[in-house]
Amino acid sequence: MRVVGMNSGTSVDGINLALCEFSPGPQANTLSCRLLAQKEYAHEPALRQQVLRLCREKHAPLDELTELNFVLGEAFAAAFLHFMRDEGLTSRDVDLIASHGQTIYHLVEAGRTLSTLQIGEAAVIAHRTGITTVADFRVADMAAGGQGAPLVSFLDALLFADDEKTRALQNIGGIGNVTFLPARQGSTGAYAFDTGPGNVLIDYGARYFTQGQAGFDEDGKLARNGQPNQRLVDEILAHPYFKQTPPKTTGRELFGDAFAEAILTTAQQRQLSMEDTMATLTTVTAESIAHAYHNFGPAQIDEVIVSGGGSYNPVLMAGLQAALPDTQVRSFDTVGLPASAKEAVTFALLGHETLYGRSANLPQCTGASAHTILGKITPGANYLRVMQQLFKSEQAEPAAAEQPYLNKLTFVN
């Protein structure tokens, strides 16, 4: 089964795509995965600004929100078709699209109904591409009482659970999230949560200090020569979220532009330079991650494997290593899979599991009451062919009811 995973993250930088080929593994309940191609296409600036504005303002006219769902669907479809042209692929080369869409609001406030909204209409994607599309992965977990995140923990646990090493799989996208994998416990020992801001505060500072010319601090250049203001760092890390017991998730609803703007206002009042302010924002991300490990992680962590855009910021990576002196901190790139492709690969895997009727959430990570099949299937022009292919594989493999979820995933070159 060949699946293209698509994702646009909290930073709203662009659409990541990864073409994955899944095959049955050597043992029952296992899969092998081959990454055949991956790319990112930047969002149109006006579309990115519209999404960021709606996330910042936390409200939108119904007509704008309705239209944006279809506009983003068109953007995802266009990115897929561009990807196909760039890679020299035809519609026969892809069986399924798995699209996370774009998170607009993630509601996990106390006293409110747990809920989430990802948009980027799957029917538009399926129609424009002709490929059956699975989308809207988070809502099934939330219907089961979970927080709908972090879903990437499913990939983390299947790939990296180890008999010797205790690992932390840290993603630093707009928001940071971690999966802890204690040694000798397999995927059942995994637990996860959002650590807090990832790049979201740093990105805001980069946009502010460059008058919108830069969307992020490339290579940590703006923070490299600054000194963090530890008093301000400590004040930010006193926020109640960092003391909240997992499972927990967060997003731009809490650590968004308004939060970042307040920090910059305080920094200006204290006459911090641009470099010192950016160093402070970068330190907040590194220390919030380290504090999460000390407060809620295993007693000893042998290695941290970092993915997401933050893994390409050497100043942030150095800060994280300094905050965790007894742990090896390394990039996800070093394990043979590009860090930039991880989330798209995750959603390709989740879409594959949806089609096969297997659950793909880890309740101990999301807080859900049960293992749940994720995603909604929208048929494309290839739907009957895919169903025939699925039927043939089900004749050769045990029924889904006998293997409700995977035990192991292996990447092959």
Image: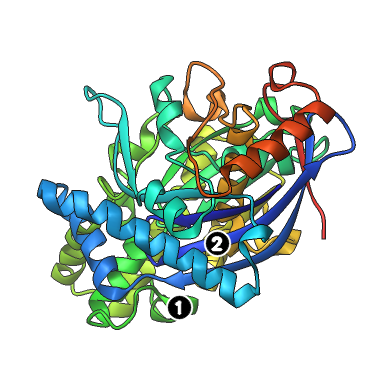
Mark 1, secondary structure of its residue: helix
Considering only vertical position in the picture, is 112 above or below 375?
above
**Residue sitting at 23 percent across and 53 percent down?**
55
| Residue under pointer 2 | 17
Task: Give amino acid for label 1.
Answer: Glu
Query: Label 2 near label 1: C-beta < 8 Å?
Result: no
Residue 44, can we see it? yes
**Residue sitting at 44 percent across and 44 percent down?**
195
Counting residues from the start of the chain, the first of labels 1 and 2 encountered is 2
Depth check, mark 1 against mark 2: the one in front is 2
Q: Can you name the residue that lies furthest to the left here? A: 61
Q: Nearest the camera: 161 or 159?
A: 159
User: Alpha carbon of mark 1 to alpha carbon of mark 2: how far?
Assistant: 22 Å
- Give the x, y percent position of residue 153: 58, 39
- Dividing the picture into quadrants, the one containing residue 339 is bottom right
Considering only vertical position in the picture, is 263 above or below 410?
below
- Give the x, y percent position of residue 377: 49, 37
| Residue under pointer 1 | 218
Task: Give amino acid for label 2.
Answer: Leu
Q: Can you name the residue that lies furthest to the right here? A: 26
Quadrant where the C terminus lies? bottom right
Mark 2, secondary structure of its residue: strand
Considering only vertical position in the picture, is 295 above or below 214?
above
**Image position of 189 (left or right of 121):** right
- Give the x, y percent position of residue 290: 51, 48
**Residue sitting at 38 percent across and 73 percent down?**
216
Is the image coloured rainbow, by chain, by secondary structure, or in one colour? Answer: rainbow
**Image position of 399 (left or right of 58):** right
